Amino acid sequence: MPVEFARRLTGTARTTGANRQLGGALAFIAGATNAGAFLAVRQYTSHMTGMVSSMADDLAVGEWRPAAGAFGAVLSFLSGAATTAVLVNYARRRQLHSQFALPLLLEAVLLLVFGLIGARLASMHGLFVPVTVMLLCFAMGLQNAVITKISRSEIRTTHVTGLVTDIGIEVGKLLYWNRLQEDRSLHVVADVARLRVLSLLVGAFFLGGVMGAIGFQRIGYAATVPLALILVVLAIVPAADDVRRYLGRGTNHQKEA
């Protein structure tokens, strides 16, 4: 991947095209992680709607332990999103190039940990939920929050329900019949460009899900290692820019001394 292209994808100078390209890549990773996680721990780790519904159902029938597990998963996802906000604002205050790259690099580390020692983590429990579930929910919270902040809530990569809803709205606009004699300012017009982006995100998530499921069936937990490497490639350039700037300042201070 060319350096300038990688810098444009996760750097601080944002464009609509870069946001959508990054969104597609992250949707693929989310889909692959979600599918692999289901095969590994029998839970979809980005599906917070299902987690909250499950928690409510379990509480209603007095199943306290599963309810606590669902709560732990939701809390992990929330913590991941909050961590992204902290990292982005910390980097922004210090005018770092890696504002949006830092959460992705942290996600890469978590996926790498899952891929290398996931089988051991699956036997460990915290907050009544396996550590693997907490780790992956945290990672999905990180990722969803970073693309949400980058795109100003235009793009979500783990929230397929919202994407499909928006696709339905745009399809409804496409099918709406505008009367020719009506004032054209009253005509309903679909946003075809947005429809393409939404379809791309859902398609990328689906493709990632297929690849993630196949990968986990063939190589197990290690299927997340390539996903971690993709994230590193996406995010490493802005982080390297910050390192070079820091080293450059240190060299200048030495010369002045």
Image: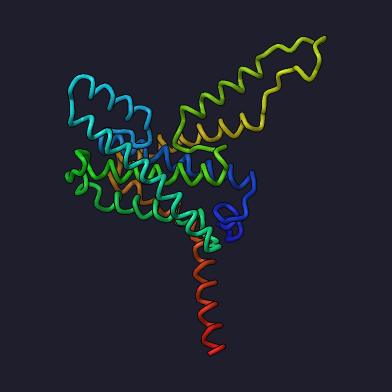
Residue drawn at (32%, 40%), measured in percent from left and top? 75
Image spot of residue 252 (x, y percent): 56, 83
Residue drawn at (55%, 61%), measured in percent from left and top? 97
Residue drawn at (30%, 42%), measured in percent from left and top? 218
What colour scheme has been applied to the protein in the rendered image? Answer: rainbow
In the picture provided, is 153 more to the left or to the right than 208?
right
* Residue 146 seen by the camera: yes
Of 4 and 156, the residue lying toward us = 156
Question: From what the image shows, is residue 45 above or below residue 186?
Answer: below
Residue drawn at (56%, 62%), measured in percent from left and top? 95
Image spot of residue 220 (x, y percent): 28, 44
In the picture provided, is 43 more to the left or to the right than 104?
left
Viewport quadrant of the N terminus: bottom right
Image spot of residue 19 (x, y percent): 58, 45
In the picture provided, is 175 more to the left or to the right than 27?
right
Question: From what the image shows, is residue 119 above or below residue 242?
Answer: above
* Residue 234 seen by the camera: no
Quarter where residue 62 is shown:
top left
